[in-house]
Each structure stands twice: as C-alpha cells, then as structure tokens.
Amino acid sequence: MPRIPFVIPLLLSLLGLAACSPPPTLDQQLYIWQRQWRPAHVEALAQTRLDFSTLRVLALQAHPKAGWARAYPDLQLLKRDGRPLVAVVRLDGQLPQLDPRAIGEQITSLLHDWQAAGIQLAGLEIDHDCATARLPAYAALLQDLRRQLPAELKLSITALPAWLASDQLEPLLASVDSSVLQVHAVSDPRRGLFDAEQAQHWAAEYAARSPSPFLLALPAYGVALLDSPAGAPRVEGEAPLRQGGTRRELQADPQHVASLLAELRDDPPPGLSGIIWFRLPLAGDRRAWPIDTLLAVVRGQPLRPALDLHAQQNGQLSELQLVNRGNLASALPAHIELPAQGCTAADGLGAYRVTSTPQGLRFTRQHPGQLAAGSQRALGWARCTQIDQGGLHVEL
C-alpha cells in the first residue's frame, strides 16, 4: 500500500482548523457628538470604557452661514480616559466650495491646541457629505491636507452609499488611510432612519470597492420629523427646533440593528474592521438609546423590556410609578390591573386614567407612548389600606 506523505494530512488538518476558526472580532468604537460637554460625560465615558476601544470626538465644524465653530470637549477627561482618540472635523455638505488653505489652517490650529493639552491623537476624520459630482474636488482637498498633516497621523473620512454609483470612489479612498461607511440617515427621512437589509447590501458593495480597511457607522439614536410649509420635513435631533406642529418620532430599532450586527460578526464583508456607533448616550438625552440598550446590542445580549411598578408610600397614600427595568423600550401598557384593598381615592396621571374594580384599581391608557429602558413614568396615586405590587397585571 502506498504511504501518504506526511505533509498531506498536515495540510488537511490546517485547512480544517481554518474552516472551524471563528470570524475576526469586529472592533467597536463610539462617536461623541456634543459640542458642549457637561458633567454627564464623566459617567458616560466610565460606562463605555470596557466595550468601546476608540473614541471619535466632534472637534470642529464648518457651515455655509455660521462659518467655523469649535466643539469644546473636556480634553483632560479624555486624557484621563486613556483610549485612542480620533478628532472629527465636520465640513457641511452645502458649503459652496472647499478652501484648502482655510481648512488646513483651522485643522492645524486645532491639532496644536489639542497637543498643547497633552492629547496625542490617533487619527483625524473628515466628515463631508458632498454631492457625488464633487468627489474629484474632495479628493484633491484630501491629498492637499495629507501633505500638511504629521506623517504619523492617520487620516480617515466618512463615506455615503450614494458614492457607490461613482467611478471616482476609488481615487477618493486612495487618498486616505481608512474610511467609515455611514448607513443611517442617508435617505429621505420620511422613508425611515435606518434599513438593516439595505445597510448590509451597501456594506457588501462598499467592501468590493474599498482599497483599504473600513468601518461601518451604525445608529443608536432617534430623530423627530417636523412638517414644513416648504414640503420637505425638518429633522430635529438633540437640539429642539423652534417650530410648532406635529412631531413624528423615528428611531433606529435596536432589534433590527442587533440582527445586522450578528450577521456582520458571523460573516463580515472583506475589509470590514469594525463598527462605530452614533452616538454616546448621556443622561437626559431623549433621543439616543439608553446606555443599557446600547451595551446589550454591542454585547449580543437578549433585548427585552421588563415593566414593574414602584409605589412610594406615605401612610395610606401611594405615589405610583411605572418602571422599565429591562434593556429595551416598551410600549405603554393599554391596561394595568393593580390589586388593592380599602381604596378611598385614586387618580391617574399623564397618559392614564383610573377606575375602581372589585379587585382594586384599573389604569387605562388614553394615548400611546413609550417607556425607554431604564426610565420611569408617573402612573398616578392612590389612597388605599393595602396595595399588592406583586400582583400587577399588564396588558399591552
């Protein structure tokens, strides 16, 4: 019987190990997009330290009418945090033209000030949502900027799915070290903030075109659409717009985003090195996902709401609050049955009205709403001799 060369089973063994090896881990990074920093940033950075490797911090903006404006991050807090930092320069897509000299001067001044504060940047990101027809001019700007920057400073840009239709995409990406494909808030807002299936398609197409590693920017926030007399709705984010009328809330669905992330982890497109989340949630940020939701998605944990009742008692008077102790927002329940005895008075608050039943109290929702993960909402009050919180029955 002929002997099989030793190298053949060894090769087959190595191939088997390669086939069974897990896909590469996707790096997780985080955008910090507030122009003015506040004490809530201290806790937010501490809560995210273990899950996000790199912070991309809004540093400088240029708008057609307002001109240049600095953001004012707490540089000493960032220095103590110790994670790699990328400064983000936002050039509004509606700028009539790009002035390489002015842009270079502004960025040079910014880098000097951050370095003077003891910050050693890992990179610089240019965020410019220009029209596809202007990509050649944008590439020329980046090449000029690359010559002005320190050689060790990595240069990256954000990219739009619309640019996939242009043959100028490759020359543009060749002028930077890496890029970030943005797949949220890139279409007519009336069509929604994010489409997971479309995002996966864009990522695969972009992977086939990008000559260098890229990251994917995923949403962890919501916006409101305000009707406008001009036709196209206005988009309200963190800062409220001084405009009346109907507000329609849109939010990236955490479950949809989590499903996409799981698929990307199992079968990442070639060249995809990580995910950047927009944006760091702060306490009181009414449109960013709560931190518990963001961390659960990043960690691949199950997403579920967990409604509970909290009663603050003072004698027979109880102030009732509905609490969501889960990591996913919940629709406000249509009905809440609360076993109670000896009730002489009660009233609902906000979205709820209360009626008496033989078993206790029944709270009925008057209009729809949501209860974010980790938040609470006043339900009402009751004057009863006994309230059985454990017997609470919720009907969504």
Image (cartoon, rainbow, N blue to C red):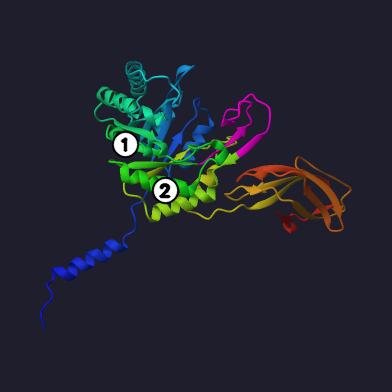
Tell me if I can see residue 315 in this picture: no
Residue 267, image quadrant: bottom left
Task: Mark 1: give few (<14), some (14-19) or many (20+) Cα within 10 Å.
Answer: few
Q: Which residue is mark 2?
A: 201
In magenta stretch: residue 226: yes
Residue closest to the eye, 230 or 293: 230
What span is colored magenta in the figure?
A: 220-249
Q: For numbered disc 2, what is the local secondary structure?
A: helix
Residue 149, image quadrant: top left
Apparent side of residue 265 relative to residue 354 in the rendered image (left or right):
left
Q: Which residue is mark 1?
A: 167
Q: For numbered disc 1, what is the local secondary structure?
A: loop
Q: What residue is rendered at 14% in x and 68% in y? A: 7
Q: What residue is rendered at 48% in x and 31% in y? A: 33
Give the prevailing secondary structure in the magenta stretch. loop
Q: Position of residue 381 (x, y in %)?
A: 80, 44
